[in-house]
Amino acid sequence: MPIATPEVYNEMLDRAKAGKFAYPAINVTSSQTLHAALRGFAEAESDGIIQISTGGAEFLGGQYNKDMVTGAVALAEFAHIVAAKYDITVALHTDHCPKDKLDGYVRPLLDVSAERVKAGRDPLFQSHMWDGSAETLADNLAIGQELLAKAAAAKIILEVEITPTGGEEDGVTHEINDELYTTVDDAIRTAEALGLGEKGRYLLAASFGNVHGVYKPGNVVLRPELLKDLQEGVGSKYGKQSPFDFVFHGGSGSTAEEIATALENGVVKMNLDTDTQYAFTRPVADHMFKNYDGVLKVDGEVGSKKTYDPRTWGKSAEAGMAARVTEACANLRSTGTKLK
């Protein structure tokens, strides 16, 4: 069962929270990066999450028409086939989707899964993200209520981002400032609107100084201990211990101490994109620099097919990204925790 059923995905998240580890959520943009992520998980003996952003889906849809739904569905169907060769379980997720792209991405994908469930099958994706961080919290949660109801009906988990994450992710940009911290009041309003599981399960991307991308030390101040305040503030009001399943956005470049604190306070999923992009591209750059006279037809020569063949440098790219995924599993304590 390489692609998690709804029941298994819930079990994965429950095990992560109870065991104080998290699953790396790896953004992929091609069949090759998908294989790199699967390989990294398998080598770490860890289950994991594969995710596709709006930009990734547009790229997968081809540059002729750039259709996000086509790109996401095609890679998800491909994943259902090739993941069977890996001895781990993965969930498929769609990453950041702002309001202006809901009708062209998440809502159609929810409809695809609803039709599958109606026919007695499992949903195509196991979770989808609604990024309403650019909206007012009231509007964010109102849309979240609508999407949560549709997701729950299709046996899908919703991820919500209620306050901004700094930096830029597929065109959604937020400044790096003091607004990058979710308050207890924000979390209480979220619980009031979305419930605490009775209306459908959701993952909460709360802000504790997170920034997309990698920045030099001192530019970003992470406060993962803030997550404990949110758990306790909402938990005391509703009589429920650790009510939230948190997501760590902007995880690339974080310190071991910051990650450990986040895990202790309920993070079950951490997104990685920037670091894995670099890990994929670095071996390619190395190959091109070392073999420039083979990959290029210099001064009238014919080059070397063995060096410009995409399979040659593509294998190194896959290995580089897979190694970074394996490292992420170790950082998040998911190594060796795969479902038996």
Image (cartoon, helix red, strand yellow):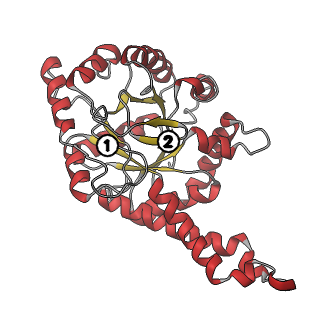
Secondary structure under the numbered disc 1 in the rendered image = strand
In front: label 1 or label 2: 2
Horizontal and vertical percent position of residue 29? 60, 51
Please tell me which residue lies in front, 69 or 92: 69
Horizontal and vertical percent position of residue 338? 37, 55
150 up-or-down from 231: above or below? above
> What label sits on residue 268 in the rendered view?
1
Badge 1 crowding class, 10 Å Cα cut-off, few under 14, some 14 to 19, many 20 or more, is many
Q: Which residue carries the number 2 mark? A: 169
Callout 1 amino acid: Val
Looking at the image, which residue is at 19% across and 31% down? 231
Looking at the image, which residue is at 14% across and 29% down? 232
Callout 2 amino acid: Glu
Q: How many numbered discs sit on the rendered protein? A: 2
295 up-or-down from 85: above or below? below
| N-term-proximal mark, 1 vs 2 | 2
> What label sits on residue 287 in the rendered view?
none
Secondary structure under the numbered disc 2 in the rendered image = strand
In the rendered image, the quadrant that contains the C terminus is bottom left
Badge 2 crowding class, 10 Å Cα cut-off, few under 14, some 14 to 19, many 20 or more, is many
Looking at the image, which residue is at 37% across and 28% down? 202
- Please identify the quarter of the rendering in which residue 181 is found: top left
Viewed as shown, does residue 14 lie left or right of 257? right
Please tell me which residue lies in front, 86 or 239: 239
231 up-or-down from 270: above or below? above
Please tell me which residue lies in front, 13 or 263: 263
Q: Does any portion of residue 39 appear in the rendered image?
A: no
Does the residue at mark 1 contact the one at mark 2 (Cβ under 8 Å)? no
